[in-house]
Amino acid sequence: MKKIEVVENVLQANDAVAATNRQRLGRAGLLAVNLMSSPGSGKTTLLEKSIPALGPDLPCAVLVGDLQTTRDAERLGPLAVQAVQINTGTGCHLSAPQVSRGLDALDLDGLAFVFIENVGNMVCPAAFDLGEHVRVVLLSVPEGDDKVAKYPTLFQRADAVLITKMDLADLMEFNLERVRQDLARLNSRAPVILHSSKTGQGMTQWLNWLRQQRFPVTSGPA
Ligand SMILES: Nc1nc2c(ncn2[C@@H]2O[C@H](COP(=O)(O)OP(=O)(O)O)[C@@H](O)[C@H]2O)c(=O)[nH]1
Ligand SMILES: [Mg+2]
């Protein structure tokens, strides 16, 4: 029983900071996007492609969570965006207090998007609200078409699901219909975007979805 209480307290403390983060991000008039998936499913590559495509009218910043190294922030550096690496040490997900400190290191003025690349993990990030406005979950083709059913919590709370590395679908004998059926059972709300950073498939749909998500934030009450 005690164990359960501790977990609940940790989540409650996290959620309180997340609410403050969300208010702060909303006041700045930007959209915060939490990207979640396994390691190697293509989060940083997606950002490398998306940020230039959004263009100078929609400036972006990135908070990148990893256990160690500043490699992802270095990859995003040449895109001339503010990129802050958050090293979690042994932590398998980002928490709202870590994101709060990451936001302190950013100049939020004039930004359209803050992308939060979560630690690569299909389980733990799902439980932790960071104060984001939307949650995007990536599933890459090489991970296999059974993963939606095996890791349901992540997909249940997604606002959009990207099936990435679609260029490998034939090679990997990926059963897209199976994935669609599993997703339909868990989450009928989130659009499913078929994407490849290599061929550009789904890029327009993804960018349009992102742009649309900004409206409730920018045109909502102050
Ligand atoms: N074939 C293929 N490879 C990709 C695609 N997107 C990313 N990759 C590769 O997948 C690897 C991991 O990508 P990365 O963006 O670092 O994944 P992350 O760990 O989720 O940030 C890299 O070698 C990328 O070049 C894609 O659409 N198709
Ligand atoms: Mg990465």
Image (cartoon, rainbow, N blue to C red):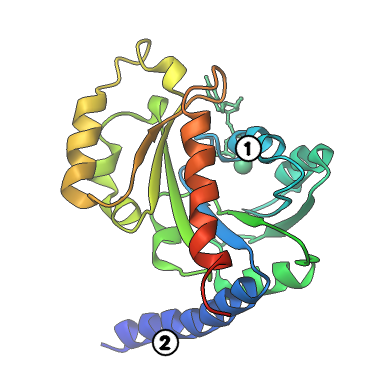
What amino acid type should be assigned to the residue bearing mark 1? Ser
Report the amino acid beneath label 2.
Asn
Residue drawn at 49 percent across, 50 percent down: 212
Residue drawn where x is 38% and y is 10% of the image: 171
Q: 147 left or right of 208? A: left
Of residues 35 and 113, the one nearer the viewer is 113
Foreground of the two, 112 or 129? 112
Q: Position of residue 136 (x, y in %)?
A: 45, 50
**As rendered, which of 211 and 126 lies closer to the eye?**
211
Q: What element carries label 2?
A: helix
Picture layout, residue 108 above or below residue 15: above
Q: Name the residue under label 2.
A: 9
Answer few, some or many: residues within 10 Å of disc 2's Cα (few below 14, many 20 plus, some between 14 and 19). Answer: few
Horizontal and vertical percent position of residue 72: 71, 43
**SS for tag 1?**
helix
Q: Residue 35 carries which label?
A: none
Placement of 144 over or under 192, stated as above or below:
above
Residue 167 appears at what percent x and percent y?
A: 45, 16
Mark 1 crowdedness (10 Å alpha carbons): few <14, some 14-19, many ≥20 = some
N-terminal label among 1 and 2: 2
Task: Measure the alpha-carbon separation of dots 1 and 2.
Answer: 37 Å
Circle 1 is placed at which residue position? 50
Q: In this orientation, does residue 113 appear?
A: yes
**Relative side of 120 to 169, left or right:** right
